[in-house]
Image (cartoon, rainbow, N blue to C red):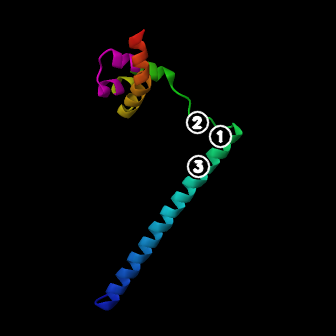
Amino acid sequence: AQGVPRIVLESVQDMLLKLALQMAHDDYEDRRERQRQGIELAKAAGRYAGRKTDTATHARIVALREGGKSIAETARLAGCSQSQVKRVCAMARPAVGDKKELARS
């Protein structure tokens, strides 16, 4: 196709592609919303508690960090991500108010 028919054909193809992408995105969002609603209902009914904490991995992370290992090295040795190492260390670290109470004791 040449000239005007080519331009029209490309425009229609572009429009159909955008339409298909929008439909896929809407479907994804709908599924996520239904999943969120289902989890809320299951939590309210007491049938869903979420993933349980892996206390062994958490203890390993804390021990490695107290041993002076870097975040990257700790993640590699513990078999987890660096973001999990940071999160576990933040949970294990006493809060600012707790530090003040410990200093007074």
What's under tag 2, amino acid-wise? Gly
Which mark is on residue 50?
A: 2
Q: Is residue 79 visible?
A: no
Q: Which residue is mark 1?
A: 43
Q: Is residue 31 above or below residue 58?
A: below
Q: Earlier in the sequence, mark 1 or mark 2?
A: 1
Q: CA distance from mark 3 to mark 1?
A: 11 Å
Residue with the most extreme top position: 105
Tag 3 secondary structure: helix
Q: Residue at x 57, y 54 (%)?
A: 33
Q: Residue at x 51, y 63 (%)?
A: 26
Q: Is residue 6 magenta?
A: no
Q: Is residue 67 magenta?
A: yes
Q: Looking at the picture, how far across and down is residue 92, in whole percent?
A: 43, 22
Foreground label between 1 and 2? 1
Task: Assess whether mark 2 and mark 3 are in contact (beta carbons under 8 angstroms).
Answer: no
Q: Looking at the picture, how far across and down is residue 9, in whole percent?
A: 37, 84
Mark count: 3
Q: Main secondary structure of the magenta part?
A: helix
Q: Which residues are magenta?
A: 62-75
Q: CA distance from mark 1 to mark 2?
A: 9 Å
Which mark is on residue 36?
A: 3
Mark 3 is surrounded, within 10 Å at the Cα level, by few (under 14), some (14 to 19) or many (20 or more) other residues, namely few
Residue with the most extreme right position: 45
Residue with the most extreme bottom position: 4
